[in-house]
Image (spheres, rainbow, N blue to C red):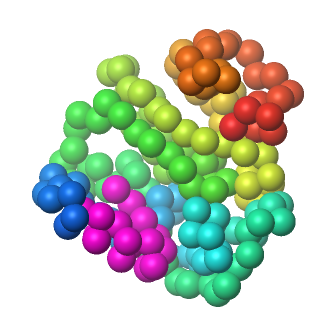
Amino acid sequence: SFEPGTREQGLFEENLKLNRMSTVRLIKAAVSNVRGTARLAVAEDGALNSLAVTDRRDQIIEQWQETPTIRLDDFLEEEGINDVDFVKIDVEGAEWLVIQGAQTLFSKPTPLTVLFEAYDPNAKGFGSNTATVLEYFINLGYRLSYFGKNGELVPFSKVRPEFGTEYY
């Protein structure tokens, strides 16, 4: 699991200890499209930490923190990880950066489930939007669904205007 925020890293490590989870490893970095460093906007609500200022009024930035960045494709190659069947992406607008750094992974013919949240006000801070992310996966042949009102999976094959606003 990747976590760039130092406050959230501490919470994550404490959670691992409390739950005796020895098979989960914390990587103290942000997943992006480049290896290097970036500035992380540390928000009052840690769930809104981001590598950019988003278009959300509730993203109250307390400070900026330098954080390492890594490409997911590079990480998997360096770790010798070949079999990935599930990826969760929750990066407050940087979804397109994560995808750009994981094109080898997402293009593999083996089945892969990707769970992500994409919200246009977050993506706007990166010059991106939800439609770009969805179109990328559609063009690769992924089957897409969103969670309906009762938690059921609702399949779709075309991007609709409410994706990224009403549904995210």
Residue at 38% of width from left, 71% of height from top?
11
Q: Horizontal placement of 141 versus 25: left or right?
A: right
Quarter where residue 48 is shown: bottom right
The image shows residue 88 at horizontal and vertical percentages of: 45, 42
Q: Horizontal placement of 17 versus 33: left or right?
A: left
Nearer-the-camera pick, 144 or 69:
144
Quarter where residue 83 is shown: top left
Q: Is residue 163 above or below residue 100?
A: above
Q: Is residue 63 above or below residue 108?
A: below
Residue at 66% of width from left, 13% of height from top?
156
The image shows residue 33 at horizontal and vertical percentages of: 53, 56
Residue at 40% of width from left, 52% of height from top?
72
Nearer-the-camera pick, 158 or 109:
158
Nearer-the-camera pick, 133 or 5:
5
State yes or no: residue 48 in magenta: no
State yes or no: residue 11 in magenta: yes
Q: Is residue 52 above or below residue 102?
A: below
Instruction: Judge whether residue 133 can be spotted in this image.
Output: yes
Q: Report the predominant secondary structure element of the magenta stretch.
A: helix
Nearer-the-camera pick, 17 or 2:
17
Instruction: Judge whether residue 131 can be spotted in this image.
Output: no
The residue range painted magenta reads 1-16
Task: Assign the N terminus to one quadrant of the image.
Answer: bottom left
Q: Horizontal placement of 96 versus 9: left or right?
A: right
Quarter where residue 71 is shown: bottom left
Callout count: 0
Q: Horizontal placement of 122 versus 38: left or right?
A: right
Residue at 50% of width from left, 46% of height from top?
89
Task: Assign the C terminus to one quadrant of the image.
Answer: top right
The image shows residue 70 at horizontal and vertical percentages of: 43, 63
Q: Is residue 138 above or below residue 120?
A: above
